Image: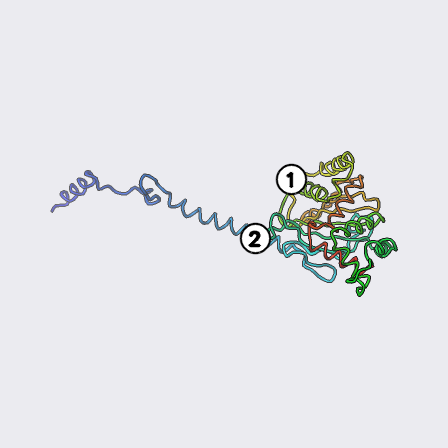
Amino acid sequence: MSLISKVLVKRSCFGVGIRRTPHWYSQYSTTGNVRVNKKSSKVVPVLTALALASIFAKKWYDNSQIKKADATSVTVDPAISAFPKKMGPPQWPFSTQYELLGKGVRCVSSITFKAYGLGIYMAVEDKHLVAEVLDSKFLSQAFIDTESSSSLVKSHQEKLRDALNDPAKAPILINNLLDSGIRLMSKNTPIKAGSFKLLMDGTKKSVFKNPDSQLQDKDRLEAGFQELHDCFRSVKGLVARDDDFFIELNNDCSMNLFYYARKKDKLVTLGTVKEPLIGKLLFAQYLSAVDPPSLEAKQDVMDALVSLS
Protein backbone atom coordinates (compact mmCIF):
# COMPACT_ATOMS: atom_id res chain seq x y z
CA MET A 1 0.00 0.00 0.00
CA SER A 2 1.30 3.37 -0.97
CA LEU A 3 2.03 6.05 1.59
CA ILE A 4 -0.93 8.12 0.34
CA SER A 5 -3.28 5.15 0.77
CA LYS A 6 -2.11 4.59 4.36
CA VAL A 7 -2.77 8.23 5.23
CA LEU A 8 -6.25 8.06 3.73
CA VAL A 9 -7.08 4.89 5.69
CA LYS A 10 -5.86 6.48 8.93
CA ARG A 11 -7.98 9.60 8.37
CA SER A 12 -11.04 7.53 7.50
CA CYS A 13 -10.70 5.59 10.74
CA PHE A 14 -10.74 8.82 12.74
CA GLY A 15 -13.64 9.96 10.68
CA VAL A 16 -15.85 7.01 11.73
CA GLY A 17 -15.24 7.42 15.45
CA ILE A 18 -11.78 6.18 16.34
CA ARG A 19 -10.54 9.51 17.61
CA ARG A 20 -7.37 10.57 19.23
CA THR A 21 -7.79 11.10 22.94
CA PRO A 22 -7.42 14.81 23.83
CA HIS A 23 -4.44 15.65 26.01
CA TRP A 24 -6.73 16.68 28.87
CA TYR A 25 -8.80 13.49 28.86
CA SER A 26 -6.23 11.51 30.86
CA GLN A 27 -7.05 13.70 33.87
CA TYR A 28 -10.62 12.39 33.97
CA SER A 29 -12.31 9.05 34.46
CA THR A 30 -15.97 8.48 33.84
CA THR A 31 -18.41 6.42 35.84
CA GLY A 32 -21.83 6.66 34.30
CA ASN A 33 -22.43 10.32 33.63
CA VAL A 34 -20.18 11.55 36.45
CA ARG A 35 -16.68 12.72 35.71
CA VAL A 36 -14.07 12.70 38.45
CA ASN A 37 -10.96 14.77 38.20
CA LYS A 38 -8.14 12.31 38.88
CA LYS A 39 -5.83 15.12 39.86
CA SER A 40 -8.34 16.39 42.42
CA SER A 41 -8.96 12.86 43.70
CA LYS A 42 -5.31 12.69 44.66
CA VAL A 43 -5.44 16.07 46.39
CA VAL A 44 -8.34 15.17 48.73
CA PRO A 45 -6.50 12.36 50.59
CA VAL A 46 -3.48 14.61 50.98
CA LEU A 47 -5.59 17.39 52.51
CA THR A 48 -7.32 14.86 54.78
CA ALA A 49 -3.96 13.52 55.92
CA LEU A 50 -2.73 17.05 56.62
CA ALA A 51 -5.89 17.84 58.61
CA LEU A 52 -5.51 14.69 60.70
CA ALA A 53 -1.85 15.44 61.25
CA SER A 54 -2.80 18.93 62.43
CA ILE A 55 -5.37 17.50 64.87
CA PHE A 56 -2.87 14.99 66.29
CA ALA A 57 -0.19 17.66 66.52
CA LYS A 58 -2.56 19.95 68.44
CA LYS A 59 -3.53 17.10 70.76
CA TRP A 60 0.12 16.29 71.35
CA TYR A 61 0.88 19.94 72.05
CA ASP A 62 -2.05 20.26 74.44
CA ASN A 63 -1.00 17.13 76.28
CA SER A 64 2.59 18.34 76.45
CA GLN A 65 1.37 21.48 78.23
CA ILE A 66 -0.38 19.48 80.97
CA LYS A 67 1.51 19.78 84.22
CA LYS A 68 2.35 16.40 85.68
CA ALA A 69 2.18 15.68 89.39
CA ASP A 70 5.27 16.29 91.49
CA ALA A 71 6.03 16.76 95.19
CA THR A 72 3.89 19.91 95.29
CA SER A 73 0.86 18.64 93.34
CA VAL A 74 -1.44 15.65 92.82
CA THR A 75 -3.07 14.10 89.75
CA VAL A 76 -6.86 14.35 89.54
CA ASP A 77 -7.27 13.14 85.96
CA PRO A 78 -4.63 12.50 83.24
CA ALA A 79 -6.44 14.87 80.86
CA ILE A 80 -5.85 17.95 83.04
CA SER A 81 -2.95 19.50 84.91
CA ALA A 82 -2.11 18.27 88.38
CA PHE A 83 -3.70 20.22 91.25
CA PRO A 84 -1.32 22.15 93.52
CA LYS A 85 -1.35 21.02 97.15
CA LYS A 86 -1.18 24.67 98.22
CA MET A 87 -2.44 27.83 96.54
CA GLY A 88 -2.40 31.46 97.60
CA PRO A 89 -0.76 34.87 97.26
CA PRO A 90 1.32 36.25 95.65
CA GLN A 91 0.83 33.86 92.71
CA TRP A 92 -2.94 33.74 93.12
CA PRO A 93 -5.25 36.62 94.14
CA PHE A 94 -6.83 34.80 97.06
CA SER A 95 -7.23 36.31 100.51
CA THR A 96 -4.97 33.73 102.17
CA GLN A 97 -3.03 30.50 101.68
CA TYR A 98 -5.12 27.40 100.99
CA GLU A 99 -4.30 23.72 101.38
CA LEU A 100 -5.89 20.90 99.39
CA LEU A 101 -8.30 18.76 101.43
CA GLY A 102 -9.89 16.60 98.76
CA LYS A 103 -9.99 16.01 95.01
CA GLY A 104 -12.13 14.08 92.57
CA VAL A 105 -13.86 14.05 89.22
CA ARG A 106 -17.35 15.28 88.51
CA CYS A 107 -19.20 12.94 86.15
CA VAL A 108 -22.34 14.06 84.32
CA SER A 109 -25.14 11.81 83.01
CA SER A 110 -23.09 8.66 83.44
CA ILE A 111 -19.88 7.57 85.13
CA THR A 112 -18.16 7.50 81.74
CA PHE A 113 -18.63 11.21 80.92
CA LYS A 114 -16.12 13.22 82.90
CA ALA A 115 -17.02 16.89 83.15
CA TYR A 116 -14.35 18.45 85.34
CA GLY A 117 -11.85 17.89 88.10
CA LEU A 118 -12.79 19.28 91.51
CA GLY A 119 -10.47 20.27 94.33
CA ILE A 120 -11.61 21.48 97.77
CA TYR A 121 -9.14 23.64 99.69
CA MET A 122 -9.13 25.00 103.25
CA ALA A 123 -7.43 28.15 104.55
CA VAL A 124 -4.31 27.07 106.44
CA GLU A 125 -5.01 29.69 109.12
CA ASP A 126 -8.49 28.20 109.74
CA LYS A 127 -7.56 24.53 110.21
CA HIS A 128 -7.86 24.91 113.98
CA LEU A 129 -11.58 25.60 113.58
CA VAL A 130 -12.25 21.99 112.59
CA ALA A 131 -11.42 20.62 116.04
CA GLU A 132 -12.96 23.58 117.84
CA VAL A 133 -16.30 23.07 116.10
CA LEU A 134 -16.55 19.32 115.60
CA ASP A 135 -15.15 18.50 119.04
CA SER A 136 -17.37 21.02 120.81
CA LYS A 137 -19.34 19.67 123.76
CA PHE A 138 -22.72 20.28 122.14
CA LEU A 139 -21.97 18.62 118.80
CA SER A 140 -20.12 15.75 120.45
CA GLN A 141 -22.93 14.92 122.84
CA ALA A 142 -25.79 15.50 120.42
CA PHE A 143 -24.47 14.13 117.13
CA ILE A 144 -21.10 12.39 117.46
CA ASP A 145 -20.36 10.67 120.75
CA THR A 146 -23.89 9.41 121.27
CA GLU A 147 -24.35 6.41 123.52
CA SER A 148 -25.24 3.15 121.80
CA SER A 149 -24.19 -0.44 122.13
CA SER A 150 -22.46 -0.34 118.76
CA SER A 151 -20.55 2.87 119.38
CA LEU A 152 -19.19 2.29 122.89
CA VAL A 153 -16.04 0.63 121.59
CA LYS A 154 -15.38 3.28 118.94
CA SER A 155 -13.07 6.25 119.31
CA HIS A 156 -14.24 9.84 118.91
CA GLN A 157 -12.70 10.01 115.42
CA GLU A 158 -14.45 6.82 114.36
CA LYS A 159 -17.77 8.19 115.62
CA LEU A 160 -17.09 11.47 113.83
CA ARG A 161 -16.49 9.61 110.58
CA ASP A 162 -19.80 7.79 111.01
CA ALA A 163 -21.59 11.07 111.70
CA LEU A 164 -20.07 12.77 108.66
CA ASN A 165 -21.34 9.91 106.51
CA ASP A 166 -24.80 9.98 108.09
CA PRO A 167 -27.28 11.74 105.72
CA ALA A 168 -29.10 13.29 108.69
CA LYS A 169 -26.11 14.32 110.82
CA ALA A 170 -23.60 15.40 108.18
CA PRO A 171 -25.46 18.57 107.04
CA ILE A 172 -25.75 19.75 110.66
CA LEU A 173 -22.04 19.26 111.34
CA ILE A 174 -20.95 20.89 108.07
CA ASN A 175 -23.33 23.83 108.47
CA ASN A 176 -21.91 24.47 111.94
CA LEU A 177 -18.42 24.37 110.45
CA LEU A 178 -19.40 26.86 107.74
CA ASP A 179 -21.02 29.13 110.35
CA SER A 180 -17.71 29.23 112.25
CA GLY A 181 -16.16 31.48 109.59
CA ILE A 182 -13.92 28.83 108.05
CA ARG A 183 -12.60 29.82 104.62
CA LEU A 184 -12.73 27.30 101.78
CA MET A 185 -11.99 27.34 98.09
CA SER A 186 -13.02 25.10 95.19
CA LYS A 187 -10.99 24.61 92.01
CA ASN A 188 -13.01 23.44 89.02
CA THR A 189 -11.00 22.35 85.97
CA PRO A 190 -12.90 21.24 82.83
CA ILE A 191 -11.92 17.86 81.40
CA LYS A 192 -14.09 18.61 78.38
CA ALA A 193 -14.34 22.06 76.80
CA GLY A 194 -17.54 23.87 77.73
CA SER A 195 -18.84 27.39 78.15
CA PHE A 196 -19.14 30.04 80.82
CA LYS A 197 -22.88 29.49 80.83
CA LEU A 198 -22.31 25.85 81.76
CA LEU A 199 -20.06 26.94 84.64
CA MET A 200 -22.70 29.31 85.93
CA ASP A 201 -25.57 26.86 85.47
CA GLY A 202 -23.59 24.06 87.12
CA THR A 203 -22.92 26.25 90.17
CA LYS A 204 -26.56 27.25 90.38
CA LYS A 205 -27.68 23.63 90.00
CA SER A 206 -25.46 22.52 92.89
CA VAL A 207 -27.04 25.16 95.11
CA PHE A 208 -30.54 24.03 94.15
CA LYS A 209 -29.69 20.36 94.78
CA ASN A 210 -29.04 21.15 98.43
CA PRO A 211 -32.33 20.23 100.16
CA ASP A 212 -31.94 23.23 102.49
CA SER A 213 -32.38 25.55 99.50
CA GLN A 214 -36.11 24.77 99.55
CA LEU A 215 -36.36 26.16 103.09
CA GLN A 216 -34.66 29.48 102.38
CA ASP A 217 -36.08 32.92 101.58
CA LYS A 218 -36.73 32.86 97.83
CA ASP A 219 -36.10 36.58 97.43
CA ARG A 220 -32.66 36.24 98.99
CA LEU A 221 -31.85 33.26 96.78
CA GLU A 222 -32.95 35.11 93.65
CA ALA A 223 -30.88 38.14 94.64
CA GLY A 224 -27.88 35.85 95.15
CA PHE A 225 -28.36 34.16 91.78
CA GLN A 226 -28.57 37.57 90.13
CA GLU A 227 -25.19 38.44 91.68
CA LEU A 228 -23.83 35.14 90.33
CA HIS A 229 -25.17 36.01 86.88
CA ASP A 230 -23.61 39.47 87.04
CA CYS A 231 -20.20 37.91 87.73
CA PHE A 232 -20.33 36.14 84.35
CA ARG A 233 -21.34 39.18 82.30
CA SER A 234 -17.74 40.12 81.59
CA VAL A 235 -16.88 36.75 80.00
CA LYS A 236 -18.40 34.91 77.06
CA GLY A 237 -17.61 32.03 74.77
CA LEU A 238 -15.90 28.73 75.36
CA VAL A 239 -14.05 27.49 78.41
CA ALA A 240 -11.09 25.43 77.25
CA ARG A 241 -10.10 22.11 78.71
CA ASP A 242 -7.64 22.51 81.59
CA ASP A 243 -8.64 26.10 82.40
CA ASP A 244 -9.59 26.85 86.04
CA PHE A 245 -12.70 28.26 87.68
CA PHE A 246 -12.13 29.21 91.33
CA ILE A 247 -14.75 29.87 94.02
CA GLU A 248 -13.34 31.33 97.24
CA LEU A 249 -15.66 31.14 100.24
CA ASN A 250 -15.01 34.01 102.64
CA ASN A 251 -15.56 33.88 106.41
CA ASP A 252 -19.01 35.49 105.99
CA CYS A 253 -19.96 32.92 103.29
CA SER A 254 -19.75 35.47 100.47
CA MET A 255 -17.91 34.14 97.40
CA ASN A 256 -15.13 35.53 95.22
CA LEU A 257 -15.06 34.11 91.68
CA PHE A 258 -12.00 33.86 89.42
CA TYR A 259 -11.25 32.36 86.01
CA TYR A 260 -7.79 31.33 84.80
CA ALA A 261 -7.10 30.80 81.07
CA ARG A 262 -4.09 28.50 81.19
CA LYS A 263 -2.81 28.82 77.62
CA LYS A 264 -2.97 32.61 77.78
CA ASP A 265 -1.70 32.61 81.38
CA LYS A 266 -4.41 35.14 82.15
CA LEU A 267 -6.46 35.36 85.35
CA VAL A 268 -9.77 37.23 85.40
CA THR A 269 -11.56 38.34 88.57
CA LEU A 270 -15.22 37.68 87.80
CA GLY A 271 -16.69 39.32 90.87
CA THR A 272 -18.26 38.63 94.26
CA VAL A 273 -21.54 37.01 95.32
CA LYS A 274 -22.31 38.80 98.58
CA GLU A 275 -25.47 36.87 99.50
CA PRO A 276 -24.17 34.29 102.06
CA LEU A 277 -26.93 31.77 101.36
CA ILE A 278 -25.41 30.93 97.96
CA GLY A 279 -21.93 30.20 99.30
CA LYS A 280 -23.16 28.24 102.31
CA LEU A 281 -25.57 26.08 100.31
CA LEU A 282 -22.96 25.43 97.62
CA PHE A 283 -20.17 24.28 99.91
CA ALA A 284 -22.56 22.31 102.11
CA GLN A 285 -23.56 20.46 98.92
CA TYR A 286 -19.88 19.78 98.18
CA LEU A 287 -19.19 18.41 101.66
CA SER A 288 -22.33 16.79 103.07
CA ALA A 289 -24.69 15.83 100.24
CA VAL A 290 -25.73 12.26 99.57
CA ASP A 291 -25.15 13.01 95.87
CA PRO A 292 -22.38 15.65 95.85
CA PRO A 293 -20.71 16.99 92.69
CA SER A 294 -17.84 14.57 93.35
CA LEU A 295 -18.22 11.70 95.83
CA GLU A 296 -14.46 11.08 95.70
CA ALA A 297 -13.70 14.68 96.68
CA LYS A 298 -16.27 14.55 99.48
CA GLN A 299 -14.76 11.37 100.95
CA ASP A 300 -11.27 12.88 100.80
CA VAL A 301 -12.52 15.94 102.69
CA MET A 302 -14.25 13.77 105.29
CA ASP A 303 -10.98 11.91 105.91
CA ALA A 304 -9.14 15.23 106.24
CA LEU A 305 -11.71 16.63 108.69
CA VAL A 306 -11.48 13.50 110.85
CA SER A 307 -7.69 13.73 110.94
CA LEU A 308 -7.88 17.40 111.99
CA SER A 309 -10.38 16.82 114.79
Residue with the mark numbered 1: 237
Where residue 38 appears, x then y in whole percent?
37, 45
Per the image, label 2 sits on a secondary structure element best described as helix
Neighbourhood count class around disc 1 (C-alpha, 10 Å): few under 14, some 14–19, many 20 upward: few
Vertical order, 8 against 54 (above or below): above
Where residue 216 appears, x then y in whole percent?
77, 39
Q: Quadrant of residue 237?
A: top right
Q: Quadrant of residue 31?
A: top left
Q: If you read the primary sequence from the N terminus, does the residue marked by circle 1 or circle 2 appear first?
A: 2
Residue at far left of view: 1
Where residue 253 appears, x then y in whole percent?
81, 44
**Can residue 127 be seen from the camera position used here?**
no
**Identity of the amino acid at label 1?**
Gly
The image's colouring method is rainbow
Where residue 45 appears, x then y in whole percent?
44, 49
Vertical order, 88 against 273 (above or below): below
Neighbourhood count class around disc 2 (C-alpha, 10 Å): few under 14, some 14–19, many 20 upward: few
Q: Which mark is residue 192?
A: none
**Can residue 144 be seen from the camera position used here?**
yes
Taking the image as shown, residue 176 lies to the left or right of residue 66, namely: right
Per the image, label 1 sits on a secondary structure element best described as loop
Residue at far front of view: 149
User: 161 or 184: which is nearer to us?
Assistant: 161
User: 185 or 284: which is nearer to us?
Assistant: 284
Image quadrant where one finds the C terminus: bottom right
Residue at far bottom of view: 153
**Identity of the amino acid at label 2?**
Ala
Residue at far top of view: 219
Q: Please say if the residues under marks 1 and 2 sit with CB atoms less than 8 Å apart.
A: no
Residue with the mark numbered 2: 57
